[in-house]
Amino acid sequence: MNPKLTRRRFIKGVIASGAAAASTSLWYSVSGQNRPAGSVERLLSINVNGQVRRVDVSPQETLAHTLRYKLGLTGTKLGCNRGECGSCTVLADDVNIYACSTLTHEVKNKAVLTVEGLRAADGTLHPVQAAFIEELSPQCGFCTSGQIMSAVALLNTNPRPTREEARQALSGNLCRCGAYDHYLNGVMRASGQLS
Amino acid sequence: MSSHDVMPDMGLYQPVTVEDAAGIARQFSTRGWLVGGGQDTYGWLKDRAKRPEVLIDLKGIESMRGIRETADGIEIGALVTLTELTTNSLITGRYSLLAEAAGRVASPQIRNVGTIAGNVAQDVRCWYYRRGLNCYRAGGNLCYADTPEGMNREHALFNASRCVAVTASDTGPALVALEAQMVIHNGSSERVVSAENFFVGPNIDITHTTVLRPGEILTAVRIPAKWANAEFYFEKVADRNVWDFALVSISAAMRVNNGVIEESRLVAGAVEATPRRLDRIEQAIRGKARNQQTADEVAALAIQGARPLNFNHFKMPLLENLVNRAVRGHA
Ligand code: FES
Ligand code: FES
């Protein structure tokens, strides 16, 4: 595979070149026409990973779409785009939600946290990220950012969960590789219950 | 019909008062669509199976939030999430039946945004209908599920009338058992409907699952003190523990004195288009001891009048067994 043109580079390149708006309207036919008067303002300031980002958001746009294709935050994955897998999980005001099944306009007054916002300013990984690496939790990795975000939401409210509580908390995140127990090991390690 | 993975172009309104929301809803009528948590909404839109022109996001309406005590029980704002129902001490303390039912809906992320109003007002899950086929419920004149080859394992046992879909709600049966009242606002006046009358079957209105009409908003759910701290039983059987809708669920509230059942409400989910009140069971167990013998005597009454389809016969023993467990009081 040509290392210069991975999918991620392509998406980021499109966004960086300023072509996002044009290509978005081509692919997704966000024409802006036929919209009744009095509808929401498109230009939003949204708080993502502690930064206020100005972004043009169409009324029906999902948060996953804004994050990935407008803000270049491709760590949030789209698996099903139907609220049925969890790979798009992000936090809104510390609560884990499906970004594919949330309109960006619904979270304009909330603090959004994605997997990119977890590590400390000096680059230190979040304890959940470090523990998932230590426990070799991911297999292919596609579901991983969603699993991480659900685990972070859990540990924010319940710093020492039982394994069963962790299982419940991560039950809205499917793993096609079946690495569930490895993720649970990671949660137990991140909460200091494995050494 | 192909499945689209992105939202269609539409307008979005975010009113902050019930009056404004109802006004917008009235203005757009069937071209408008009320959104709470949106978890039943976006699939319809992404599939282009329903094509409203504007979304009316109700989440900015503060008066529809929160759980408060009233003179006779509690009032739950329509925007209260299913997660809040599982953690609020008034609910988990006095009405744990509702907390349990809410805790079995879908997945944690969906419960975090899904609202009590959305859970009761959600549409049926028949996949033929969801696929956008022009069936009875969609305004057409045939049912794809009730045919010799139709996949109807999840469909109705009772009171099907052309459409054989069942209610998908887990909290609906619990609210009927608790004799909840649904508060409906049309922008200028309010009407209150019992949970039992809130849901409507296809014999009455085949294109709606509730009495809500365009321009009307379910703003709150009231639960009377009558059933506070009663003995409750909830069980939901589904193919998967997460995400899945019930194959059959049972919600029961009972007043038991010295081991004798004085009064009860038993309601089954996912066996007809509305939550199904099991009044024959309620009458049969009144004044009886709450034990296995009583349960064995009455459970078969639950399936009297059932008319199974090709692939859902299994729901009859399933319903009977769940009623048996609810009456004796343990799994
Ligand atoms: S992509 Fe959002 S739940 Fe699957
Ligand atoms: S690690 Fe491959 S899907 Fe979970």
Image (spheres, coloured by chain):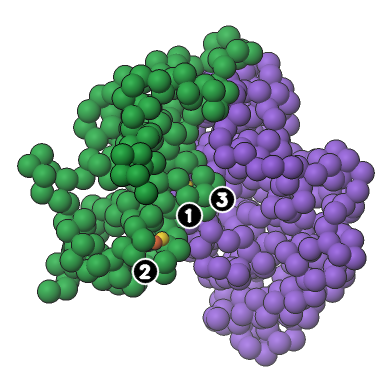
Chain colours: A green, B purple
Horizontal side of B88 relative to B26 (left or right) equals: left
Kind of residue sitting beneath label 3: Pro
Instruction: Say which element carries label 3.
Output: loop
Quadrant of res B181:
top right
Question: Between tags 3 and 1, which lies in front?
Answer: 1
Kind of residue sitting beneath label 2: Ala
Q: Is residue B241 above or below residue A146?
A: below
Look at the image and tell me in which quarter the N terminus of chain B lies.
top right
Which of the pair A162/B22 is nearer the observer?
A: A162
Horizontal side of B244 relative to A78 (left or right) equals: right
Q: Residue furthest left?
A: A122
Horizontal side of B253 relative to B103 (left or right) equals: right
Q: Is residue A156 above or below residue A21?
A: below
Question: Between tags 1 and 2, which lies in front?
Answer: 2
Q: Are marks 2 and 3 in contact (CB under 8 Å)?
A: no
At x 67%, y 67%, the residue is B247
- Classify 10 Å Cα crowding around label 1: few (below 14), some (14-19), many (20 and above): many
Some atom of ligand 1 lies within 8 Å of the CB belonging to the residue at label 1: yes
Residue for badge 3: B224
CA gap, disc 2 and disc 3:
46 Å
Residue for badge 2: A179
Residue for badge 1: A85
At x 60%, y 68%, the residue is B238
Horizontal side of A2 relative to B9 (left or right) equals: left
Which of the pair A152/B121 is nearer the observer?
A: A152
Q: Is residue A175 visible?
A: yes
Q: Residue furthest right?
A: B141
- Classify 10 Å Cα crowding around label 2: few (below 14), some (14-19), many (20 and above): some
Which of the pair B190/B35 is nearer the observer?
A: B35
Residue B55 in the image, given as x and y percentages of width and height = 59, 26
Some atom of ligand 2 lies within 8 Å of the CB belonging to the residue at label 2: yes
